[in-house]
Image: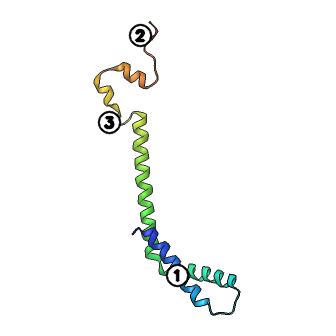
């Protein structure tokens, strides 16, 4: 199970636990729920620190991976990548010029 799901379930569990503790208190339902939200947020700050750190690390890894993939794609599209430059290794300059949107001098004849 991913850290994000664990953290979310932990937050929901804390909210439900606090709401159940506040249920017998003679207050308006809206006030009870608002108190449950505030108290569970404060408890989650301390009790779920490990899960929050795991989730943040996972998100950071995802961002780093996506940036790397984005840079590889941009370099491949720009022609900087060796794999994208394999067509120029064949020695056919006209296909490279056509791919780049350039017209060869022979095209006008």
Pointers 3 and 1 in contact (C-beta within 8 Å) = no
Q: Residue at x 69, y 81 (%)?
A: 30
Q: Which residue extends farthest right?
A: 28
Image spot of residue 71 (x, y percent): 42, 44
Select label 2 or label 1 by which is in front. 1
Q: CA distance from mark 2 to mark 3?
A: 28 Å
Residue 78 lies in quadrant:
top left
The residue that label 3 is drawn on is 83
Q: Which residue is mark 1?
A: 14
* Contact flag, marks 2 and 1 (Cβ < 8 Å): no
What x and y, as percent, mark residue 11?
A: 52, 76
Secondary structure under the numbered disc 3 in the rendered image: loop
| Mark closer to the chain start, 2 or 1 | 1
Based on the displayed image, in which of its 4 quarters is residue 18 positioned?
bottom right
| CA neighbours of label 1 inside 10 A, class few (<14), some (14 to 19), many (20+) | many
x and y percentages locating residue 26 in the rendered image: 68, 93
Q: Which residue has dot 2 on it?
A: 106
Tell me which numbered mark, 3 or 1, is placed earlier along the sequence. 1
The quarter of the rendered structure image containing the N terminus is bottom left
């Amino acid at each position: 199970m991913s850290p994000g799901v664990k953290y979310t379930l932990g937050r929901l569990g804390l909210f439900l636990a606090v709401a159940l503790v506040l249920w017998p208190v003679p207050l308006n339902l809206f006030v009870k729920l608002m108190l449950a939200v505030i108290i569970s947020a404060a408890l989650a700050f301390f009790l779920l620190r490990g899960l929050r750190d795991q989730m943040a690390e996972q998100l950071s890894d995802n961002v780093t991976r996506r940036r790397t993939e984005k840079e590889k794609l941009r370099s491949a599209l720009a022609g900087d990548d060796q794999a994208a430059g394999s067509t120029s290794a064949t020695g056919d300059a006209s296909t490279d010029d056509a791919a780049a949107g350039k017209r060869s001098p022979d095209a006008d004849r």
